[in-house]
Amino acid sequence: MRADQLPAAAPGTWSRRRSAKARKAPAQIRAATASLLGCLTAGAAVATGHENSAVALVGTAVVAGAIILERRRMASVLWAGVAFTAPMPGVRLTASLTETFTVNITLIDLMIVAALVTILPDGLRGWRRVVPEGVVTAFGLLVAAGLLGTFFAPDVGASLVNLVKIVLAAAGSVVAMALWSPEPAALRRFAWLWFAGATISAGWAAATPRSVSGRSLGLTTHPNHFGLVCVLGVGLGLGLALSTGGRGRAAALAGIVLLTTGIGLSGSRAAILGLIVTIGMTAVLTRKFRLLVAAGVVVVLAGMTVIAGIVTIPASNALSRLGGGGGSALSDAERDKFAAEAVASISRHPVTGQGFEFAQAAHNIYLQVLVVGGPLALLSFVVVGGLIVRAGLRASSAERGQPDGAVLAGLTAGYSGYLCSGAFVNILWDRYLWTFVGLLVILSASTRRPRPEPAEPERDGPAHGAGPGPGLALAAGHLPGS
């Protein structure tokens, strides 16, 4: 065949080949970096003791995956690890570098860093289209207000350390997931794995006696963290149960029962409030008011099993503490003390705050934000939360009746449960919370993408040279439009 008879290349073919070659070297660098990260993880785990063998296995898996799998597949594996380990912040690598300096690294920290290695640098574009408009500005104002307050902090270094924590854990987790920009199927896997991790944490609490003052921790570091993980898990589980059927629905419902039990075992009264808000809001958003009836029946049956002695629960359970028992009086006294100290700090610096040094001291996220940066910080924090909830509400309304609509409703309800219970907890920058928010943000953004219009079938057959018509295409094994 002569050169002038060769078929013309499709537009952009050569540029795509050039870009593929250009990406080859960075991909190799990313693989090498991921391998190095895995080696360091495994080495650190071995050096710090036998109890960290699980972390060593994770590091080895990262090395093997970076070598064997191609980059995108490796990213999917690592983000699956992020989802599964997010509700387990108590599973961590602890290394005492000196007598006074100890490093705590959770599995999810390692997973997020390794996952970022696989998507950078060609994932740097487009994340702003995923995050709701105004959230970045409001979060920036929150950080700026905290920086101003840092000038009045008793310990500037401690304030800056906590600033880095909230930026990396909160904004960093959401932006990292936005950079990932997964397909809908990957998002659904992420949701199921997050739910599975939370359920396993609740199962661990039910099966093991590990507790603080009779309150279960699950696979977290504090009963209040465990309670919030269970609340978020219930919201997500409700969405998954309403969006699927058969074995998937049965698995989601079983997980919800276990997570609800976990809330009782955690002894967290704030988690009870969050649970009520989550279930009620999910019922309203999905128009499935039978959820409220089902929740009432479950509560009555659970109460009957406890009264009959069929099930034995610890004295420090959430309902007992809600009624004033289970050591709640001591907790209330401590909370009152912390709140008084926060109010005193606010009165000393009502406009600027005192930075991030005491950002978790008051056991009330709204008082804590006032301590951080005054009214500007509080307003910015409320705007961030409000914009995220608004995005979830709009997306769940637009997708009502669709599987994603139910999941969005559960995610939005779970996050709203956190905001309502926030007056009684100090949780601000934990990754399990912000990966949950990241899932809500990305899934909400996916509903704003224009959907392709179905192609109009040709009535008189294809034009000359256009290829086989729809019937021939199907007979040949090709889908129309493929």
Image (spheres, grey):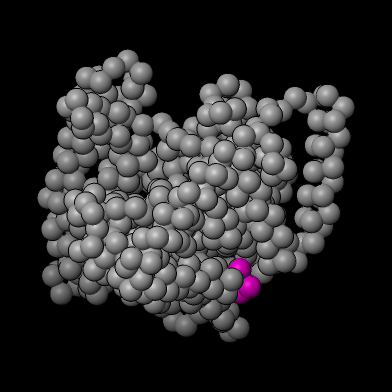
**Quarter occupied by the N terminus:** bottom left
Q: List x then y, in percent, for residue 125.
A: 27, 67
Q: Quadrant of residue 420?
A: bottom right
Residue 481 visible in the displayed image = no
**Residue 334 falls left or right of residue 109:** right
Vertical order, 394 against 427 (above or below): below
Residue 107 visible in the displayed image = yes
Looking at the rendering, the stretch of residues picked out in magenta corresponds to 395-399
Question: Outermost residue, top direction?
Answer: 50
* Residue 19 part of the magenta-drawn span: no
Q: List x then y, in percent, for residue 173.
A: 36, 54
Image point (50%, 71%), residue name: 386
- Depth check, front residue: 354 or 206: 354
Vertical order, 139 against 223 (above or below): below
**Residue 296 falls left or right of residue 218:** right
Image point (36%, 54%), residue name: 359
* Magenta segment main secondary structure: helix
Image point (63%, 46%), residue name: 269
Q: List x then y, in percent, for residue 36.
A: 17, 35
Q: Tally the numbered discs.
A: 0
- Depth check, front residue: 93 or 340: 340
Vertical order, 89 against 382 (above or below): above
- Depth check, front residue: 182 or 168: 168
Vertical order, 376 against 56 (above or below): below
Image point (36%, 60%), residue name: 345
Q: List x then y, in percent, for residue 116.
A: 27, 50
- Depth check, front residue: 146 or 78: 146
